Image (spheres, rainbow, N blue to C red):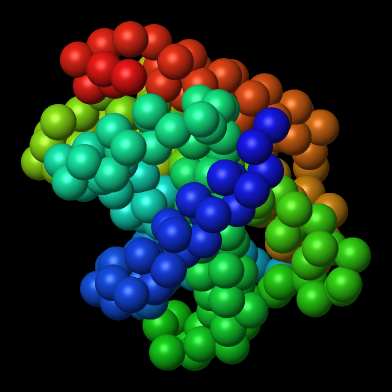
Amino acid sequence: MHSGAIIALTQRELIRFLRQRTRIIGAVGQPVIFWLLFGAGLRTSFRPPSWAAGLAHEVTYQEYFLPGVATLIVLFTAIFSTISIIEDRREGFLQGVLVAPVSRLAIVLSKISAGTILAILQAGLFLLIGPMLSWIGAGADIHVSWSLSRMLMAAVFLILIAAELTALGFVIAWPMNSTQGFHAIMSIFLMPMWLVSGAFFPGGDSGWLFWLIRINPLTYGVAGLRRLLYEQPLPVTPELPSMLTCLSVTVFATIVLIVVSAKMVSRASVNNAA
């Protein structure tokens, strides 16, 4: 595989993203504001999920929402990093890469690696400082495990979620010809996908919505991150799958999306004349 091409294209994406400061603000600022505002506004009406009954402390909404906000930061970063595919096609850069002696898989991996690096840096920074800022919103303690092993495992799992969502963004952005169309898909698909992942509210016994949450692959990313961040071990329930299930589904979804991305790039189409 063309490792040099992957590194060069990844560096280009990182530099491009960091030079556009509005993207950084949008990827991190909005989720953090959501976390603080919803944490303060919903703390009195929040009903902890069933799996929280055995914990030594009462789970506040801000603590429950913490893994969801980290996932939302990853989602926004994936959106902003893959939307550049449309811009590159319009500017002619993508056509130049397609005719270069570079494997199509290298193109996919460079985009996914850049989005993953950016996502893990931003979400990781939030997870480090977020619990310290909890008093701004709900005024409640956030019980997060600060052990080195748990933090490293959470970082590795967050990398998997970032790769999964960036690959999903790639699949959506590749056939698009306009950024407006990409934003429309984000509004009607990506944001609802995050909302029904258990990140924003517990699924509980909510009929058809409960089953929609269970078939959502992002549900297992949020649940796995929640298990790794909390201080106490969490029970296995229908709305909180085991860590093995979360890891298996996330890895499988990531591999499938990368393969689909590579197939889309290799297939001849109007958007891929090369």
Residue nearer the viewer, 23 or 137:
23
Whether residue 253 can be seen here: no
Q: Position of residue 273 (x, y in %)?
A: 26, 17
Q: Position of residue 153 (x, y in %)?
A: 81, 56
| Residue 207 placement, left or right of 5 | left
Whether residue 16 can be seen here: yes
Identify which residue is drawn at 51% across, 61% down.
Answer: 11
Identify which residue is drawn at 78% across, 49% down.
Answer: 234
- Residue 13 vs 172, above or below: the answer is below
| Residue 225 placement, left or right of 183 | right
* Residue 58: quarter of image: bottom right
- Residue 45 vs 161, above or below: the answer is below
- Residue 269 vs 128, above or below: the answer is above
Residue nearer the viewer, 132 or 175:
175
| Residue 261 placement, left or right of 186 | right
**What quarter of the picture does the N terminus occupy?**
top right
Residue farthest toward the top in the current orientation of the protein = 268
Q: Position of residue 81 (x, y in %)?
A: 38, 52
Residue nearer the viewer, 210 or 171:
171
**What quarter of the picture does the C terminus occupy?**
top left
Q: Position of residue 155 (x, y in %)?
A: 72, 60
Identify which residue is drawn at 32% across, 37% down.
Answer: 96
